[in-house]
Amino acid sequence: MSTETVNSQPEEPTADDLPINTADDLPINTADDLPINEVLPEQQPSPTRKAPRRASKARATKPRVSPRPSDRETVEPKPRALTTISSVWQFAYHRLQMLRSSRAVRREFIFATLLLAVIFAVPFVGWLHRWMLPDSLQSYGMAILPLTVGWLWLNRYRLMLPELDTLMKRYQAGRIDRLTSAEKWVREEREYNAVISLLKEKPLPPKRLFWPLLLASLFTVIAIWIDDPSITALAFVFVVIGLVGYRHGTQALRVAAFPLLFLFLMVPLPGEWLEIARVWLNGRMMSLVLHILLNCGIQAELSLEYNPLKVLGTQPYEMWASQVRTGMAPAFLFLIGTVWYLSLIRARFRSKLFAVVCGTVWIGMLLATRLTLLAWVGVADKDLVTYLAPATLYLLPLIGALGELFVLRGIKCQKYQKWVSI
Amino acid sequence: MSKIPKVGLHIIALLLLTGLASFGARMANHWRVSRQEMVVIPDHFDVDHFRWLGVDGPPPVGDAERDHPPAVNRVYQYGTQAPVYVSIARITTLNALRTPASYLMDTDGRLLTGDKLLIRPPGETHTHYVMEIAQGHDSTILLIHWVQVPNQPAYADYASIPKSVAKSLLLHSTFYSCDVWVPLRSDSNGAFIRKTLIRFANDIEAQIRTGHLAVETNPVLPSQGDINRMPTSSPTTVPSPSISPMISPGSPSPLSPTPPGSSLDGSGGGTSPFSSGSGAPGSDQ
């Protein structure tokens, strides 16, 4: 089967002209009847356009550009005929365009999303109440869904190619974090081989997991009968995982492991557990502040229950943990955001772990400093504390993020993962 | 005309079925819960011939902490005494079983360490109520808490009846979390408050256990003479609502129990409502 189109022929290429997998063969994100073999209108070969080169020729002459965040604008191609594709990036882009242009896929996505929204609309209100409880440690729960959707969007091209890992393994391309120029060339060569396989070979159908989805659906019914926010949120996460596993198969589950696991953070924990954690954390923080105050020569006492902290002076000031907010909720939000951001960064695991530990220490220092300052100001002017406490609370994640970026810069964790597309 | 692929149709069909089944489950849940009648508590309680008159009251300050359960909230008043609050909530979620300090008080609310009294009626094998002092940044309260299944005796701790808890959470059978509390003031009489709270608790417990309103015996409307006889103040029984004992670094852990009868206000001269007076039937700690 020839891969060339004829210059003098104005006719559009038929499906038989293109030596690629059909829609049924595609393991992910393409409807069974997706017109994958069609050439998009704007990319139809015109009589004046040059015929696409053969794959081997293209390999020899055309520089195979591996997408990088820096040169994304130049690399990201216009939708083109599949025969001109010479990199995995271009193939992923092509698949995404096919998905976007497929009315069937859009319709399926809209129906499924609407049904999910209808099923979980009422429980969502319960989750929202739990996340928005005053001084709740889990106020970060509201950010989980947007962060997950953001992650999926940033990694959309990688999600188009869930079978890439398998193909790369076939060409013995392991994961190499820091590549030399020679290794980069070798990797690109392997990627090139992988994309040729994608174009020429009929991929195995995805291994769909039906039972997890079925069990998740049954669990959803039980959860809604029980009507506890923690259980319904758990059911929601299970259903989403089940949908990905059934619609796109196990390879897609592996690729989307991080956002799917990240979703578990939105599950509202039972109040009693959070209360224990909050009391313990507040106690440690108040105790730390007491020691700082005493070392600074400011007389202070702590109640038997570690709350309130009483600063002695001409006008004694009682600092209650929840009244001034110890800042645990913003601190957790900062840490969750750090983990999310690090998942987009290309670095070794130990570097990321170091960054998380540094972030924890840094935000802890910020919390202690803030409370110490509030206690010190409270002795002089209690009213001022009522203004300063909320104002400084919302500055915590911002200052924390700035410090964390500095840490990441110090350990050279600044480059995004290859497939992250901003 | 593009068609939705087969696998997509499977998903939509399954979600549709799940949605219908979930809707049915929700309706069944509402129907089952709506059939359960809330306990009816008396409009008044008579304690030592003093009649406490009740009106509907607001839910506890931190009701959101227990997911706003369906509840009967009443406030009982007598003369110039501090009002007695009653909240009987039906347990619908796990959060409704939280410790009372988390929903009766503000966000700084916590139980004072070591101040806990388990109340067991004579002849019973289990404790019926737990009496505690909770403190927030605005107030201090003395409370009695218990959980109870209709037609069953009260239990101080829900962990004593795990089957009933599981039935209430999974099958939505009726299960009550009950609280009776009084804000402590500087002129509060500990013995009188304790006696009043226990009387309230006994009557409500009997009400839930038998399903009938407590039998009234010689109700007496308060007269001026009665009011004058009320123990309005006692200089020796007041836990200060402002502050609990302070510790400095190096002091024993707050988790270690404080000696029984220790001062609550740090003055060293006062006694807690638990240690003043008498009358708690079969109290043990």
Image (cartoon, rainbow, N blue to C red):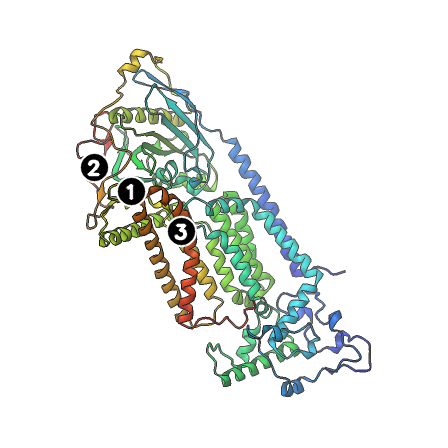
Residue B266 disc label: 2
Residue beneath disc 1: A317
Query: In the displayed structure, would residue B1 be above or below residue B69?
Result: below
Do tags 1 and 3 sit on the same chain? yes
Residue beneath disc 3: A392
The answer for which chain carries disc 2 is: B
Pointer 2 local density, CA inside 10 Å: few below 14, some 14–19, many at least 20? some
Where residue A218 sits in the image (x, y, percent)? 55, 50
Pointer 3 local density, CA inside 10 Å: few below 14, some 14–19, many at least 20? some
Of A299 and B219, the residue lying toward us: A299
Q: Amino acid at mark 2?
A: Gly
Where residue A240 sits in the image (x, y, percent)? 55, 56
Q: Quick one: SS at disc 1?
A: strand
Looking at the image, residue A158 sits to the left or right of residue B172; the answer is right
Query: In the displayed structure, would residue B64 be above or below residue A170?
Result: above
Count of marks placed on residues:
3
Looking at the image, residue A17 sits to the left or right of residue A71; the answer is right
Choose the circle earlier in sequence order: 1 or 3: 1
Where residue A93 sits in the image (x, y, percent)? 63, 71
The residue positioned 23% from the left and 40% from the top of the image is: B245
Q: Amino acid at mark 1?
A: Tyr
